[in-house]
Amino acid sequence: MGFEGFEAFAFVVDDFDFDRLEEFRSVLHARRLRLVALYGGGEMHDSSRFETVVAQNTRIARFLSLAGADRLVLGPGRRPAKGPTREHLLNMVHCANEIGRRSLDHGVQSCIHPHVNTVLEKIGEIDFVLDRVDPRFVALAADTAHFRKGNPGHPTAEIDLFSRYVERIKYVHLKDWDPDLPPEAVGEGGTSVIRDFVELGRGKVDLSGCAEILRTRGYSGWVTIELDYTRRTPRESVQMSKEYLERQLGLTV
């Protein structure tokens, strides 16, 4: 298909650990792929879990470095029922800064990732945290669809946030969203499956606008396409997104 790399969840570290790194590298080499990033983070807003969360993510950063990758995505913890408090957000700032500082010791850039249904979802929360984290240690993992879906009252949320923070974006999830689809369903084992994210170009997100902001800024980092649920075969969905990237956005895959 032409894709060069991939992002995975941090359970890869548990699956292979450090004594099986050569096996992991062999798997990638056989498929002509590179590890780009791992998705870590966690309950950064919970001060009682500070040491645990920092240690877990430092371990992930070390694995990334040894595997030849340099991006750690910091996914926030589950969103409280009444939304995060100021204390929650300040705890997140403190925790993210420490993760970012330790990750840089391994040559890995930590990138905080605003995400629907987490502590960091709304524009005001994103602004609050990015105003306070140390930009030396914590960059932004920008996600086109989560910016838009997380702020339904702001139809230009993705463009506004990309424009405002373009200099701090060090990693990108390019993703589309269709608000006319049912947002969630129950999948196998009773797990929740997000169903309103769609192949690139099939939703309402201004992907071309976000891409133009990155192009104008001279962004040269990784752009990862992502899809939580497919109504087609995985190969068909990937092919559709790839064609959109190349034909509509002018990106080479």
Image: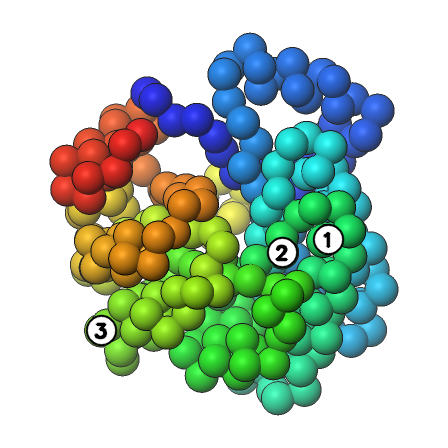
Mark 1 is on which residue type?
Ser
Q: Which residue is mark 3?
A: 155
Q: Position of residue 208 (x, y in %)?
A: 20, 53
Viewport quadrant of the C terminus: top left
**Label 3: few (<14), some or many (≥20) within 10 Å?**
some
Q: What's the CA distance linking mark 2 and mark 1?
A: 7 Å
Which element carries disc 3, helix, strand or loop? Answer: loop
Marks 2/3 in contact by CB < 8 Å: the verdict is: no
Mark positioned earlier in the residue sequence (2 or 1): 1
Mark 2 is on which residue type?
Ser
Mark positioned earlier in the residue sequence (3 or 1): 1
Residue 97 lies, with reference to residue 10, above or below; the image says: below
Q: Which residue is mark 1?
A: 103
Marks 2/1 in contact by CB < 8 Å: the verdict is: yes
Closer-to-camera residue (160/195):
160
Q: Position of residue 213 (x, y in %)?
A: 28, 60
The image's colouring method is rainbow
Q: Taking the image as drawn, is residue 81 in sight?
A: no
Q: What's the CA distance linking mark 2 and mark 3?
A: 28 Å
Residue at horizontal 38 percent and vertical 26 percent from the top: 3
Which mark is in front, 2 or 3? 2
Which element carries disc 2, helix, strand or loop? Answer: strand
Which element carries disc 1, helix, strand or loop? Answer: helix
Mark 3 is on which residue type?
Pro
Q: Position of residue 96 (x, y in %)?
A: 68, 67
Q: Which residue is mark 2?
A: 110
Mark positioned earlier in the residue sequence (2 or 3): 2
Marks 3/1 in contact by CB < 8 Å: the verdict is: no
